[in-house]
Amino acid sequence: MTTTTPVRPSPEVPRLPDGTRAGLLRRARDAVLTPRTAIVGICAVVVGYLAIVPLYYLLWGTFFDEHGFTLKGFGEAFGKGSLAGPMLLNSIEFALGSAVFALLLGAALAWVQVRTDAPLKGLFFAASLVPLIIPAMLYAIAWIFLADPHTGVINRVFGTQVLNVFSMPGMIWVQGLHLSPIAFLLMVAAFRAMDPSLEEAALMSGASRRATLRRVTAPLLRPAIIASVVLVFVQSMESFEVPAIIGLQAKIYVFTSRIYNVLQIYPIDYREAGALAVVLLAIAAFAVLLSSWLSRHASRYQTITGKGFRPRPIALGRARPFVGAAVIIYFFVTAVLPVGVLLWASLLPYYQAPSGKAVSSITLHNYSTVLHMPLALTAFRNSVLLGLGAATGVMFLTAVVAWLIVRTRVPGRRVLDVLASTPLVIPGLVMGLAVLFVYLRSPLPIYGTLWILLISYATRYLPYGMRYSVTAMAQMNNELEESALVCGATWWQSFRRILMPLMSSGILAGWVYILVVSFRELSSTVLLYSPGKEVLSVLLWEQFNNGNFTVVAAIGVLMVVTLMLLVGIAYRVGLRFGAGTDS
Amino acid sequence: MRPSVRPGRTTALALTAVLLAGCGGTPTAAFGGGAGGGKDSAALAKYAAMPDGQLVSAAKKEGSVVIYASNSSIQENAAAFEKQYGIKVKTYRADSEEVLQRVLQEAGAGKLPADLVDTNGGELLAMAVKSVLADYDNKKVTGQLRPGSVHPGWVATRYDAFTVAWNTGKIKSPPTSYQDLTDPRFKGQIELEPDDWDWYLGLHTYFTSQLHWTTQQADSFFTRLAANAKVVKGHTVQAQLLDSGQVGIAPDSYKHLIDEDHFDKGAPVVWQPVVQPVLYRPNGIGLTRTAPHPAAAALYMKWSLTDGQQLFPKQYRVPANLSVTTKNPIAAGTKIYDIPLDQMTNDSAKWSEAWQKLLQGAPTAGKG
């Protein structure tokens, strides 16, 4: 399915023949010292640097000990009795299930959101972001209270076992729901950037709806589909909360349980933890390479061309009320129920299932506790600063690097892509230790400031930024850029005034994602923050550790409210800069 | 389009940057400006022995003190100390494993800003072995403590008491001994924590060293216990499930958390009548050898073993100072067993591995 002419080389500015030695040198210098080279080069170096620090630390710890090179860690990790094999299979089942579930959910919802006149679209964005905001630990606990086979609220309401959270399907359900916003955000951006007239043309030419879906719609969305699956799959391979909170009770052991155990014991066996992480690394690298191989005919998916289009919503007709009902149900299941459990817990002195007695003990005490914490304001301010900083920084860097990866034929660009994806599978604690190690010894005054947290967040969320940016870039044909260049614009002007606005849907989606997840990052934060530089997740962890689950729930509710406000503002601002809207 | 950025160069540049940042930088002298004061054990010893009046004025001159803590009530303690002396307390709070990693990393780079470390005994021991901590010598203060509280490099301030706790709504006839827990009537009612291998170590060695069970007998007890149990990660999650009656019994509960939920929040959970023995694991505090504020550090150390102990009763914790009685105390004459610290430090991998393996034999929750 080709919608445009294949990629052509950009027009070169004609040069007068100049065979002199000085002329050659000047030409070489001009070629190297253009603003384009400088900006792209600097961004590529920064991205490479951010990714290499933890990777280097991990690999060094894995393959070297005091005696030099070693493969001992692999023996410990995969040797007899380690159960690494069955655990890896469990992990793959869990990750693949979650990825497929999250993709189906995210894609269906994104289609309804962008391409139909479904009612209640406002609820959609709320529903798509709430699971993202709630820390996975709390989301998993909320689902235990909802879907415990005996005492879960849902199972009690229906009087029978509707959902047993303590099973592989239960784990996939919770993880898939929690990560579906990744797929949703990517797919919304892709649908917005897709010209519906192509589908209309197929239908007009006599293709059935199914054939159109299979042969037109799906291929056009391929970059976004692949990116969603890769992100959710790799993140589920690496994630720890659902397997720990639900999996252990269900006696389902995954690969990361083992890494976690190794990291918990002093002295840390870096070789074994590293050997386990290296396997995840290989899987992630394979996934990223596969995705770029599958997207190798990039021009086939480019739908943003010089020809303008305006996505027109499909009238759902008689189906409209049903779709509306589905929207409400989805909103209820992913947002209202889990947030409801948190809200309910936040109003109680200790957690109880809903009952008359529980209702009579309702109090706002937990909220007053939060507001009276001496560090609440500092932590709030730091979290907002870091969230905004990490989101903006990562999206700028990755947008530029995405250009390098998608638009140029620079050999080794895939290496950069894979490199930028590695932080996805490096355990948070290892990442924290690596950053700690480097900046304790760096002459730059970064240690003990908020900057070290910013660097750590930028590293952790680099892979997400990359997938959002690469996907957005892949949908754009370079004829727009070329027209700008032909009209005399510099590369930077065309990047800033043509590419960035056209990519804004995807960039905004990535920005929102990073902003939201930055608020709950804990595993590296807790190693890197300094007294007076606390963030919200540290307060949350502290209360959780003290056993004040109901106070944790109150902080969780306040985080949901704050982030919804921030994201709402971001979308309003985004509108002014050209990000599409569907309402 | 002809690429003008060469990937080889990009990679090389990035690598160079790492190496520069990692190795080329000379560690600067101080962190956060707290470089004043004496920086060796002699200075600390001098302050430890100093009379109160002089020590307080020297500490006030330093103005602040930095504490790394996994102690979950550190904020309360810090506020009380600030109120009493007007000396600012800056705290870094994290799990005990992270406190240990941070201290060792910073000490390794010669940039440890902490004056004191307040965490679990096992982690303190590991820091002491790495010579990060200085001995505290003030018999007048340490003489008031439970015997065995003074260690090289650190002093116990309080003890975590592991007790068998249950939900009174769910469990009508509670267990009276550990052996009871293996009774079929409790099948699926018990929760165990996957990181509590030190509790496992303690109870196992109690059986073999105090009751003279064979290893096989002890192993068989734990196998039967695990068969009755489901695995619940984290003491906080455990407490929520116990409070709400989703599980009946938690044999590895912290006494102070159960008391807090029972007395302060009205949750139907108790640990009395007590199942014996109660296992003790020390938490303590240590002075760093390089304390940037040695006087304030010595003052805080002394305070946390004397006046600071008065905070524990309210938190239902077991204080190390014998002259302080906690709320709802463990009755005199109750059998107490101290989890052997040396094994906790030297054999952590062995015990943790065995605990994981044991729990993997536990049945699936929801089917039990």
Image (cartoon, rainbow, N blue to C red):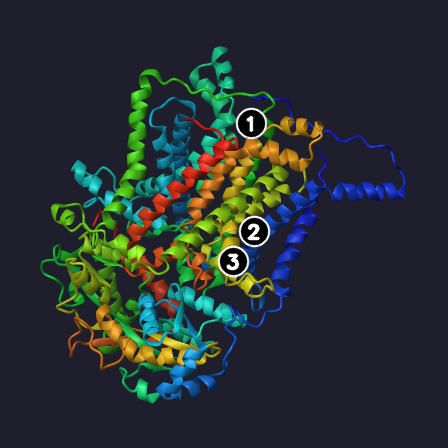
Does dot 2 land on a helix, a strand or a loop?
helix
Q: Nearer the viewer, residue B21 or A380?
A: A380
Of badges 3 and 2, nearer the viewer stands 3
Q: CA distance from mark 3 to mark 2?
A: 15 Å
Report x, y in % for residue B289.
47, 79
Which residue lies at the image location 45% right of the left edge and 31% below the top edge? A188
Q: Report the residue marked by disc 1.
A: A301
Marks 2 and 3: in contact by CB < 8 Å? no
Q: Earlier in the sequence, mark 3 or mark 1?
A: 1
Q: Nearer the viewer, residue B331 or A251?
A: B331
Could you classify mark 1 by the number of other residues whose Cα lies within 10 Å: few (under 14), some (14-19), or many (20 or more)? many
Q: CA distance from mark 2 to mark 1?
A: 29 Å
Q: Amino acid at mark 2?
A: Ala
Q: Earlier in the sequence, mark 3 or mark 2?
A: 2
Report x, y in % for residue A389.
50, 48
Does dot 3 land on a helix, a strand or a loop?
helix
Residue B135 visible, this orientation: no
Q: CA distance from mark 3 to mark 1?
A: 39 Å
Q: Report the residue marked by disc 2.
A: A51
Q: Amino acid at mark 1?
A: Tyr
Report x, y in % for residue A566.
41, 42
Which residue lies at the image location 23% right of the left edge and 51% below the top edge? A364
Q: Which numbered marker is on residue A550? A: none
Q: What is the chain identity of the residue bearing mark 1? A: A
Tell me the quadrant of the picture where the N terminus of chain A can be found: top right
Q: Report the residue marked by disc 3.
A: A452
Query: Do dots 3 and 2 share one subunit?
Result: yes
Q: Is residue B267 above or below residue A140?
A: below
Q: Nearer the viewer, residue A232 or A530?
A: A530
Q: Nearer the viewer, residue A497 or A145?
A: A497
Left or right for B139, reference A38: left
Q: Is residue A401 above or below residue A304?
A: below
